[in-house]
Amino acid sequence: MPHDTPLIATIVAGLGLAFVFGALANRFRIPPLVGYLVAGVLVGPNTPGFVADASLANELAEIGVILLMFGVGLHFSLKDLLSVRAIAVPGAVVQIGFATLLGVGLAWLLGWSLGAGLVFGLALSVASTVVLLRAMQERRLIETERGRIAVGWLIVEDLAMVLALVLLPALAGVLGGQPQVDDHSSLLSLPASYGIWGVVGVTFAKVAAFVVVMLVVGRRVIPWILHYVAHTGSRELFRLAVLAIALGVAFGAVKLFGVSLALGAFFAGMIMSESELSHRAAEESLPLRDAFSVLFFVSVGMLFDPFSLMSNGLPILATLAIIVIGKSIAAFVIVVAFRYPIATALMISASLAQIGEFSFILAELGVGLKLLPEQGRDLILAGAILSILLNPLMFLFVDWMKPWLEKRAGKTAPVEEQRPIGPATEPGQVASVQATQAKEDGPPPKTALAGHSILIGYGRVGSLVGAALKEAALPFLVIEDADKTLAKLRDDGIETVAGNAANADVFAAANPEGAKRLILAIPNAFEAGQVVLRARAANPAISVIARAHSDAEVEHLKGLGAGTVIMGEREIARGIVEVVTGKAGDPAGPAMEINPQPA
């Protein structure tokens, strides 16, 4: 292999081994990210064989962090962020303080200085952006209240770490370290001559300036750019515009305002979410987002020395206990103290029980300032790797703990709950909205509908289908996981089940055994296939109608048991041909007609 292609070699080795070990992990029902971490260990400098360029891998991983936070911002709004400030701000601050105190205590036991303990504790207090968001996305929780609290908590942690990064160089001399010589290469670095309060004031001023620029200028410029590019008709230019905005705003946030890359990308996505083209922007950035987030886990694995487990066994276990147990207990107590459901407290506790990218940055800065010994950096790296590996198990653990904790808290559900009347079950009847809302801390109640249609997804296609079903007076319910859509459906008196239809409890709440038909309006053929299998297992006689975007997807869904699969491109072509040949009616007429008589 040529020696002048380290970037290509790093990407090929990282993605190639990540695919191999990720597929093996998936085969054994282990989260794929475990395989990605193993791939990183194998291409890292601490194992024999090929060694990838660690600095390049870290920069590639940063792109993954940017795109991931950008994607979260696309599904977020300023209103969502402000709605959780009452719990996210005090919760994150108290949890950071508690974890930092635990870190200081362990540092004292190891014979380190107070400055080393503060850096060590701060590094253990902040969760990984990538790990938390991947966990939220896998469980379809980003747009739920729990997801909003977790993301808001993460944003506060990011802001706190930005402040720590600018304060540490100014405080290094006081804490027993070596003051950093400021070369003014970035506006993130502030001269120590400003004084502590001067540094804090300037930092908050720059963050405030960034927020103002994004809300005042970005809110006008970013949507305008998207609409201008969309009207050119070039999908390539639109994809390029989305990536340029995400990366450009994130990079500018660091260089001009001293804000983290993740925070800058999040605000770019949040501003872009106000455009009606935000869904398309999310679709265009998704493939790169997934690829680069995999490289993040590979880069973390490269930092890990597996032999350190033998030389630092007890300190590593103590570090891991602070991350997994100490932070989780603190988060759980804080959330419960704010009178949120136990399920919310458990989910946030599990989400925060790991550390990641900011921890590495703090560790490197601490070592560079002579505040943190190299052993501290090794403990942080080991704690990050092990906590990321254990994080999926934490979610399984909280699922097991939830019924026991609820029983201890005396929370018992009533034997019989009010059952909703499905929309248009009989002319003139209205759905009981309160009864349709699934509890935040338990599985959704099962519907009383029978002989109904189950509509999966209520986007552009699903909403048209739902309108036709309602017009035809056919009983139906909708399974949807987007909070905004659910709220609108409930306002319209349409029965809903909140969650992902691929989840057993969520799908069971729709009473598939008694349903007449299943309509899959979601564009993801792989996810739709899982739902088809679940529906056929519950009710072999159910009529299944699905949508697809290619011949391969049509065959895939039919092979799994879908009776009718409609491919959008074929229907568009059929409509065009009918108009051209004069066989069509009014093109602006009803989108579809559904026979209200039994099939």
Image (cartoon, helix red, strand yellow):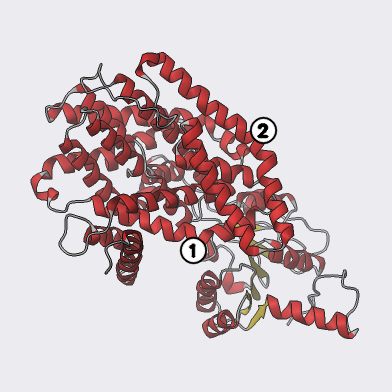
> Which corner quadrant holds the C terminus?
bottom right
User: In the image, 61: left or right of 537?
Assistant: left
Count of labels in the image: 2
> Which corner quadrant holds the N terminus?
bottom left
Mark 1 or 2: in front is 2
Q: Amino acid at mark 1?
A: Asn
- Rendering coords of residue 105 (x, y %): 20, 27
Whether residue 481 is visible, yes or no, is no
Position of 487 relative to 465 (above/below)? above
User: In the image, 166: left or right of 310?
Assistant: right
Position of 563 relative to 354 (above/below)? below
Q: Residues within 10 Å of mark 1 (few under 14, many from 20)?
A: few
Residue situated furthest left in the rendering:
311
- Rendering coords of residue 355 (x, y %): 32, 43
Whether residue 43 is visible, yes or no, is yes
| Residue 216 image label | 2
Q: Nearer the viewer, residue 518 or 414?
A: 518
Q: Choose top left, top right, bottom left or bottom right for residue 123.
A: top left
> SS class of the residue under badge 2?
helix
Q: Residue at x 51, y 66 (%)?
A: 502
Q: Amino acid at mark 2?
A: Val
Q: Which residue is mark 1?
A: 503
- Rendering coords of residue 43 (x, y %): 24, 60
Q: Residue at x 33, y 20 (%)?
A: 170
- Rendering coords of residue 209 (x, y %): 56, 27
First-in-chain label (1 vs 2): 2
> SS class of the residue under badge 1?
loop
Q: Residue at x 47, y 46 (%)?
A: 412
Q: Residues within 10 Å of mark 2 (few under 14, many from 20)?
A: few
Q: Nearer the viewer, residue 82 or 399?
A: 82
| Distance in Å between CA atoms under marks 1 and 2 | 41 Å
